[in-house]
Image: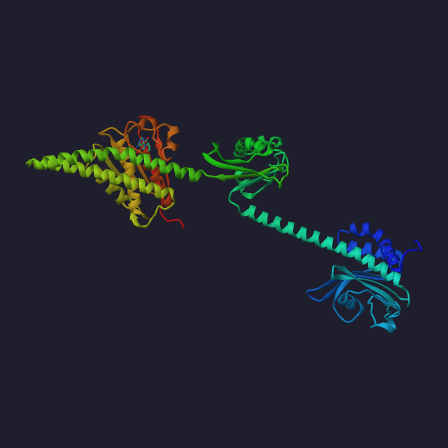
Amino acid sequence: MPASLSGRDAQFQARLEAARPLEACAADAQNLTELFHALYEETARGMDATVFLFALHEEASETVRVVRQMDRGVEHPGGSFPLGKGFTSEVIRTGTPKLIRRWATEGPPVRLLYGTETKELIAPQSGVVVPIKSGDRVLGVLSAQSYRPEAYENADLLRLDAIAAQGGIAIQRLRVTEQRALEHERRAFELEAVLATMTDALLIVDARGAIVQLNRAARALLCLDSASLVLGQPLEQQRVEQWPETAREIAAALAGTIDALRSGKSVAEAEIELHCGRLRVISVCASVLRPAGGAPQGGLILLRDVTAQRDLERLREDIFSMAWHDMQAPIAVIRGHSELLLRLLSCGESDGKAVEAEAALIVRHADRLADLLTTLFDVSCLEAGLLSISRSPTDLSALAREVADGMRTAARHEIKFEGDERVLGKWDAGRIRQVLMNLLSNALKYSPEGSMVTVSVAADEHNATVRVRDEGIGLDRSELERLFRRGYRAESARKIPGGGLGLYFSKGIVAAHSGRMWAESAGHGEGSAFCFTLPLQARA
Ligand code: ADP
């Protein structure tokens, strides 16, 4: 040290010298225990550190938390004590370092639990205690103590103070890191929770287009078990051929989206149609993940099953066009015959029969309109899940016989009823009547005049079964399943007017009773049978 240095400069220099090697070693500490070791080693290198203590001040609880302590080369765990009257507490309160040359005469005795080898408690005889500070706040203390009196000088105090200054920086750094880690953990937890509760499927891809994260809904949509997808591998390198069919279809459809994300472009709403199994419509949105001003880091792909929504839209369109198409004829008839009736009445037509015939025709077509409106309303209720079923004790045999009898009067067919005397259950008689009327009117509509239509009702231990059999146009095997879809009409039936809603609605009513409906036919021209079962005991 040059002789020209003043006393203060010399002290400053000494502090710098003392602190220099420590800087690096405290900077590496990843936690408080590592920091304790770094501080202890540095202290022991330059002074008596027979006893060494590193403690933190917990302001809220006014507690001193000893991180670790050393006694004659043996490390001991820490502990806590309330801020009291000892030197440690005093240094924390005042923020001023303390040099204790002779403990016995200068201050309260200190008792060390581990200094008991001589069977009596031994106490340090001298010590230095310095605050670890951040600005004006005291974060904790460092204390070196010796069993010898007068073991420390002012220079030791300065040295320990410099070490404490480095300790302060390290503690702040650890606290910030800890804070950040906690913050990250919290954010990650929140994100996990959001992802898990999302009903939409979400995929997160990295800059190479590799899936790095996907939520539960995405796994369900892709039908992937955990073994099928290798996270972090680009989609084109996945063993896609081993994936379930839906996942393969989606993966193929997403190739363009992933390419767009790779080149930093978002994808506004697009739709893909999945044809395996039933038709499904999936809406796809993708947005690039790009840190402010940085390069694209991949992106988020959101997949939403919009099949139900599209179905509903299609239903609305169907209903509208059906209403438009099917109502025109009866409205035109009603209008034409009303005019005719008016004319007959205004010219004093005396033929009561002619007037009555015109009026009857108007009533019949108005009824047709009303039926049509009811069907459209019922179908939209069924689609919206609002179809009401109100059960009451019903004799299915009596109901079917009554419907058959009612239709026989107007029919140009032979309608036969056969079956059990009484078949009792709790069903919605009004709705089941709608089903029976639909099946019976179809049987009449799709079979030649004069042919036989048979309605039968039978019951076994669990179910009642109704069959409506005709000798009409029949159906081929491929049509049998499709008949129950909304709006479906077999090729052979298209010359006969109809909307393709009756069977769809009837099946909905039967399903709402936990029953089943199906069609049987040996082929075109072979007649057909439409059947349904209803459980005798209503299922909860
Ligand atoms: P609609 O009769 O108004 O077309 P439905 O839903 O009642 O509507 O019937 C759907 C289709 O099922 C019909 O268009 C027809 O192709 C077929 N179908 C229904 N009942 C019979 C039947 N008894 N014989 C042959 N085909 C039938």
Image quadrant for the N terminus? bottom right
In front here: 209 or 422?
209
**Hey, which quadrant is residue 109 in on the image?**
bottom right
Residue 364 falls in which quadrant of the image?
A: top left
Measured as percent of width and height from the top left, residue 69 is found at 81, 61
As rendered, which of 328 and 166 lies closer to the eye?
A: 166
Q: Residue at x 57, y 43 (%)?
A: 215
Would you say residue 420 is visible in this rendering?
A: no
Give the percent coordinates (x, y) of residue 6: 89, 58
Q: Nearer the viewer, residue 23 or 212?
A: 23
Whole-percent x, y for residue 118 in the image:
89, 69
Q: Quadrant of residue 507?
A: top left
Taking the view exactly as shown, the residue that stands out farthest to the front is 4
407 displayed left or right of 66: left
Q: Is residue 379 left or right of residue 149?
A: left
Number of numbered tags placed on the structure image: 0
Is residue 383 visible to the viewer in this orientation of the structure? yes
State whether residue 60 is above or below residue 219: below
Q: How is the image coloured?
A: rainbow
Please name whichever residue, 229 or 206, is drawn nearer the observer in this view of the structure: 206
Q: Is residue 213 left or right of residue 45?
A: left
Q: Position of residue 155 (x, y in %)?
A: 88, 61
Quarter of the image where ligand 1 sits: top left
**Residue 401 shown left or right of residue 188 in the figure:** left
Q: Would you place residue 7 above or below residue 479 in this image?
A: below
